[in-house]
């Protein structure tokens, strides 16, 4: 058991000892604090609430479709996701691994900050989300939105040719930050629906 500091004289003596140790090592009280922080850079023993965690949910801000591939999509606000197919009436729907595409509003905002006049659907994404970090989701992650269940099959894509979207918008963020899914369970989806990671 460590000795306790009882009397006032003992406390004063203890404080003086610490000051003398810092003085001998040439450290001010502020430098001593910095030194302690460097010895514990990960904040071990500190509250875990100080460590930021990636958001596991967000919401739908737009649902977009187009009749043809390689063109901007129009926000229709509500649609039907067909199981193992994609959004009803969308050119990218079909029997393959990229049935539905998602892009975060935060990614589109990056393009606006570059001076581009763009909005939801301009990068040909089917579902525009906000609040959930899509690019951090590993392949195989299952997402729930509305009555539907999606499975992430691909993060980003390779564009071998610059499509109409690139020339219309001036750049395309979809290959870098878009994700693609297959529809495990179909159902109705609409703007405002929550998008969240399904419990495994």
Image: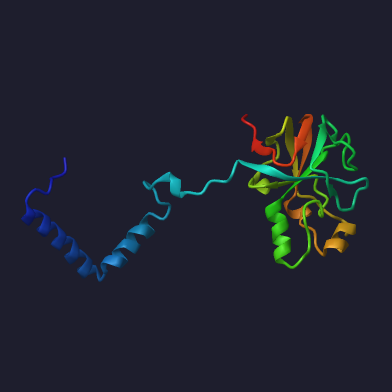
One can see residue 161 in this view: no
Of residue 125 and residue 118, the one placed in the foreground of this image is 118
**Residue that extends furthest to the right in the rendered view of this protein:** 68
> In this picture, is 91 found above or below 199?
below
Q: Residue at x 85, y 33 (%)?
A: 85
One can see residue 32 in this view: yes
In the image, taking residue 150 as reference, residue 10 lies left or right, namely left
> In this picture, is 186 found above or below 153?
above
Of residue 92 and residue 127, the one placed in the foreground of this image is 127
- Name which quarter of the figure residue 190 lies in: top right
Image position, residue 110 (x, y; %): 70, 60
- Name which quarter of the figure residue 82 lies in: top right
The image quadrant where one finds the N terminus is top left
In the image, taking residue 99 as reference, residue 15 lies left or right, namely left
Q: Residue at x 44, y 46 (%)?
A: 49
Image position, residue 77 (x, y; %): 79, 43
- Name which quarter of the figure residue 188 lies in: top right
Q: Residue at x 88, y 41 (%)?
A: 90
Count every numbered label the image shows and give the total: 0
Image position, residue 163 (x, y; %): 89, 57
Of residue 178 and residue 38, the one placed in the foreground of this image is 178
Query: What colouring method underlies this structural image?
Result: rainbow
The image quadrant where one finds the C terminus is top right
Image position, residue 40 (x, y; %): 38, 54
Q: Residue at x 83, y 62 (%)?
A: 169
In the image, taking residue 147 as reference, residue 165 lies left or right, namely right
């Amino acid at each position: 058991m460590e000795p306790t500091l009882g009397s006032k004289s003992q406390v004063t003596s203890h404080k003086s000892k610490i000051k003398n140790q810092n003085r001998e090592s040439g450290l001010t009280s502020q430098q001593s604090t910095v030194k302690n922080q460097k010895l514990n850079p990960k904040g071990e023993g500190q509250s875990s609430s100080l460590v930021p965690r990636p958001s596991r949910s967000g919401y739908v801000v737009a649902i977009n479709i187009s009749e043809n591939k390689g063109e901007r999509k129009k926000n229709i606000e509500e649609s039907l996701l067909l199981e193992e197919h994609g959004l009803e009436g969308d050119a990218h729907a079909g029997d393959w691994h990229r049935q539905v595409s998602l892009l975060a509003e935060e990614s589109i905002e990056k393009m606006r900050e570059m001076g581009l006049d763009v909005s939801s659907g301009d990068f040909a994404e089917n579902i525009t989300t906000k609040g959930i970090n899509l690019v951090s989701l590993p392949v195989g992650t299952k997402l729930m939105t509305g009555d539907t269940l999606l499975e992430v099959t691909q993060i980003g894509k390779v564009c071998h040719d610059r499509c109409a979207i690139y020339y219309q918008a001036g750049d395309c963020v979809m290959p870098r930050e878009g994700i693609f899914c297959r529809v495990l369970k179909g159902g109705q989806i609409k703007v405002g629906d929550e998008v969240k990671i399904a419990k495994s």
